[in-house]
Image (cartoon, rainbow, N blue to C red):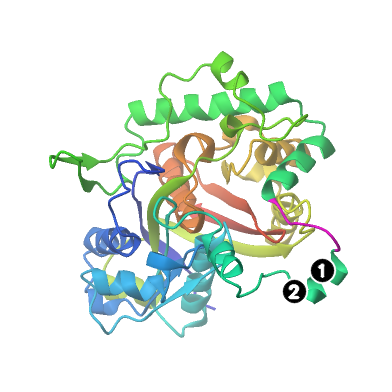
Amino acid sequence: MAEAYIVAAARTAGGRKGGRLAGWHPADLAATVLDALVERTGADPAQIEDVIMGCVMQAGEQSNNIARNAVMASRLPESVPATSIDRQCGSSQQALHFAAQAVMSGTMDCVIAAGVESMTRVPMGLASSLPAKNGFGHYKSPGIEKKYPNIMFSQFTGAEMMAEKYGLSKDELDEYSYGSHQRAIAATQAGRFKDEIVPVQITRDDGSTDTHHIDEGIRFDASLEGIKGVKLIAENGKLTAASASQICDGASGVMIVNEKGLKALGVKPIARIHHMTMIGHDPVIMLEAPLPATERALKRAGMTIDDIDLFEVNEAFASVPTAWLKTTGADPAKLNVNGGAIALGHPLGGSGTKLMTTLVNALKQRNKRWGLQTMCEGGGMANVTIVERL
């Protein structure tokens, strides 16, 4: 079987809800990343055989196959097909898995895996709430209700359940969240995101223009005391908005090729996809799946947690990476070394390839070899990807 290589990885800097990227249509925002990947590799755009794009809220401006719309908005030719997928927060990580599987099988040689989410223009929950409000039903079927009676699946409930199950205190979660901002600040000030971010031109309300190239969610003035003072999401809970991922606008992508693709493009790989796994788990606690998924992935890859040099575990809520650390025994110094979604934002379907972009760049900057990425997903699922820097 052929190998799957990453030859380019790019992302936009995150934008806050209603912030600097609010004026960008998500198809156009995703198109900037597609164009950047082609430009960075020098590939003939016609060599791209498919675009697989993750997006969670496929409604409104993100409806009608956002992936194909992004291709049509880009410099890619009409001959490049595209498809949109939804594995909730892991959508673009799954896009990466599908792209890798395509080139490993030999059915394709060059595929772009990408993701996009404008949480400003297509708010979280819109895809299910809007039809329900207009009399077109709800995703929870009678069959699901019979199996899970009187349960409203909620990531917020799941995050609190994680904190309780793993004995995590509010102070512990707040301290982790403060650390995420501190790591993101250090990475930004040191220029560690420079090579991965695609600058995006924005127009202010007054008509003046600027370039967006710094993650807008980072609180450069963050203090531990300020984080501890944020109101709880749930009464008697442990989590606050400060210990949860930020609503974010953004797009990201990676170009995946096999050996034939490498020769056709004439480029060198930056990383190799070493292992991919996914798992289904309890949809009620929902966010716990990365823990058993990591164990399964390492076992199947014949590796131990100590073999991995850097980890990216999506910070949906602070209870997820802290529980993951306690369970796996991983070195905290290897986790989300440039900050995570608590500071940088979580653009839902765009986060999978966003994290991979940051991971492969961090491996290069630190001269490390092995990276592991995982994230919790709605419905109680998780993807795990292990990469080798080349």
Horizontally, residue 358 falls left or right of residue 375, namely left
Amino acid at dot 1: Glu
Q: Residue 324, position in %: x, y?
A: 71, 41
Q: Is residue 111 visible?
A: no
* Extreme residue toward the front, this view: 134
In reply to whether residue 203 is colored magenta, the answer given is: no
Q: Quadrant of residue 317?
A: top right
Q: Are marks 1 and 2 in contact (CB under 8 Å)?
A: yes
Q: Residue 311, position in %: x, y?
A: 58, 43
Q: Disc 1 and disc 2: Cα gap in Å? A: 6 Å
Q: Residue 157, position in %: x, y?
A: 74, 45
Identify the residue under disc 2.
141
Secondary structure beneath label 2 = loop
Please give the name of the residue rendered at 58% of the width and 50% of the height, measured from the top-left corner: 372
Identify the residue under disc 1.
145
Q: Is residue 239 visible?
A: yes
Q: Quadrant of the N terminus?
A: bottom right
Secondary structure beneath label 1 = helix
